Amino acid sequence: MLAIIRYSVPDARTGEFAQQAREILDLLASQPGYVRGRLGRSVDDPGLWALVCEWEGAGFYRRALSAARLVMYPLMTMMLNEPSAFEDVDPPVSPKLGSR
């Protein structure tokens, strides 16, 4: 499953946010069921950031959020209030090998 948590970050807090988001990713990475994750920033709106993770299932993600809530708390005022958990409906698409 895919987890996407979006944040609206004021310019003055960009450095602080990026550091704290990396700490969140490190903590999430230590949790059971974590597959991979990354932090991204919108190319069209530099104030919009996304913490994106893949999990083996929704239960793993929910338990990881519970374990990470104290680390995530300082950024909650910038978090967009929207659903964050998405189930896979199609298998991942990989680039074709050998194509140019």
Image: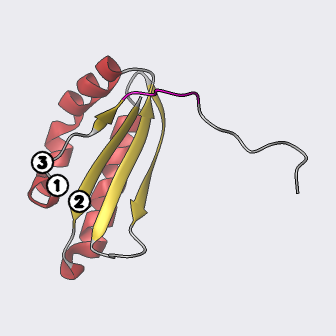
List x then y, in percent, for residue 45. 32, 75
Residue positioned 42% across, 61% down in the render: 40
Between disc 3 and disc 1, whose residue precedes?
3
List x then y, in percent, for residue 38. 45, 51
Q: Is residue 99 above or below residue 35?
A: below
Q: In this figure, which residue is indicated by the disc labeled 2?
A: 7
Marks 3 and 1, how far apart at CA: 13 Å
| Disc 3 residue crowd, few under 14, some 14–19, many 20+, Cα 10 Å | few
Q: Are marks 1 and 2 in contact (CB under 8 Å)?
A: yes
Secondary structure of the residue carrying numbered label 1 = loop
| Disc 2 residue crowd, few under 14, some 14–19, many 20+, Cα 10 Å | many
Marks 1 and 2, how far apart at CA: 5 Å
Magenta stretch: residue 2 in it? no
Q: Are marks 3 and 1 in contact (CB under 8 Å)?
A: no
Q: Main structural element of the magenta stretch: helix, strand or loop?
A: loop
List x then y, in percent, for residue 52. 39, 47
Between disc 1 and disc 2, whose residue precedes?
2
Say left or right for 71 vs 27.
left
Q: In this figure, which residue is indicated by the disc labeled 3?
A: 73
Say what amino acid the circle numbered 1 marks.
Leu
Q: Is residue 4 above or below residue 59?
A: below
Q: Quadrant for the N terminus, please.
A: top left
Residue positioned 91% across, 46% down in the render: 98
Secondary structure of the residue carrying numbered label 3 = helix
Say what amino acid the circle numbered 2 marks.
Tyr
Snapshot quadrant of residue 78? bottom left
Residue extent of the magenta highlight: 87-91
**In the image shown, does 34 or 6 lie closer to the viewer?**
6
Which residue is most to the front?
89
Q: In this figure, which residue is indicated by the disc labeled 1?
A: 80
**In the image shown, does 43 or 54 lie closer to the viewer?**
43
Secondary structure of the residue carrying numbered label 2 = strand
